[in-house]
Image (tube, grey):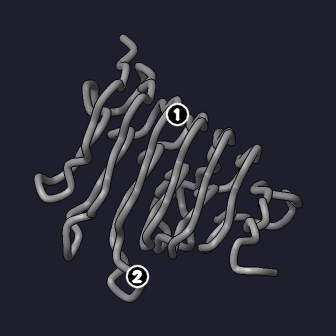
């Protein structure tokens, strides 16, 4: 494929419920489009750059009271977890049903730094705080959360976006449902 080739679209779902499926997609350099992510704990983990997640429905996250990946404690469910990468676009999606966050942004210091993260035109519902942004080793540059609709259901009322001062995204046009 040439340098201008479009990355492949990938589907995210638990194909075989007989297998314990903790994670859906985990990676970088892909376009995830028109996917339905369900029946896994975390449908999408982004661990590198050049990722676009578009027009997908991430919902009905699995939960285990004794999750072996969390040392027997309850599952930590996010619809989308972003750990690293530059040029990450999340647009036109519907994310609901995660207990921790619809989007969790952290910085895995063993991977590429975060930058140019654009979250726009999505519907989000549920989570402790719906979009939860952690403190990172360096500020996230080019970071925006715009034109999204935040549903009314979350563990901590009024906590649509939780971010430290160093990573507060540029915001405009977001709507908060009652």
Q: In this view, does 8 lie above or below 89?
A: below
- The percent position of residue 81, horizontal first and vertical second, equals 48, 60
Can you tell which mark lies on residue 153? none
- The percent position of residue 134, horizontal first and vertical second, equals 26, 60
Can you tell which mark lies on residue 112? 2
Q: Which residue lies at the image location 25% right of the left edge and 43% below the top edge?
A: 170
Q: Which of marks 1 and 2 is nearer the N terminus?
A: 2
Give the number of callouts: 2
Mark 2 falls on what kind of element?
loop
Q: Is residue 174 above or below residue 114?
A: above
Q: Is residue 121 above or below residue 64?
A: above
Mark 1 falls on what kind of element?
loop
Q: Is residue 87 above or below residue 102?
A: below
Q: Which residue lies at the image location 59% right of the left edge and 51% below the top edge?
A: 63
Q: Crowdedness of circle 1 by 10 Å Cα count: few (<14), some, many (20+)?
A: many
**Which residue was labeled with disc 1?**
122
Q: Where on the picture, by quarter, is residue 28?
A: bottom right
If the image is split into quadrants, where does the C terminus sit? top left
Q: Which residue lies at the image location 39% right of the left edge and 14% below the top edge?
A: 177
Q: Crowdedness of circle 2 by 10 Å Cα count: few (<14), some, many (20+)?
A: some
Query: Quick check: 110 left or right of 87?
Result: left
- The percent position of residue 1, horizontal first and vertical second, equals 81, 81
Q: Give the Cα distance between marks 1 and 2.
A: 25 Å
Furthest-top residue in this view:
178
- The percent position of residue 64, horizontal first and vertical second, equals 59, 55
């Amino acid at each position: 494929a040439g340098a201008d080739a479009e990355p492949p679209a990938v589907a995210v779902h638990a194909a075989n419920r007989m297998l314990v499926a903790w994670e859906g997609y985990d990676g970088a350099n892909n376009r995830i489009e028109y996917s339905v992510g369900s029946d896994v704990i975390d449908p999408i983990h982004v661990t590198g750059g050049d990722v676009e997640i578009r027009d997908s429905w991430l919902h009905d996250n699995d939960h285990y009271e004794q999750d072996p990946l969390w040392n027997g404690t309850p599952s930590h469910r996010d619809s989308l977890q972003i750990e690293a990468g530059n040029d990450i676009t999340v647009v036109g999606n519907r994310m609901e049903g995660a207990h921790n966050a619809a989007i969790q942004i952290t910085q895995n210091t063993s991977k590429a730094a975060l930058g140019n993260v654009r979250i726009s035109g999505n519907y989000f519902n549920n989570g402790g705080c719906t979009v939860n942004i952690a403190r990172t080793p360096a500020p996230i540059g080019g970071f925006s959360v715009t034109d999204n609709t935040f549903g009314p259901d979350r563990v901590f009322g009024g906590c649509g976006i939780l971010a430290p001062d160093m990573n507060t995204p540029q915001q405009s046009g977001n709507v908060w449902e009652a």
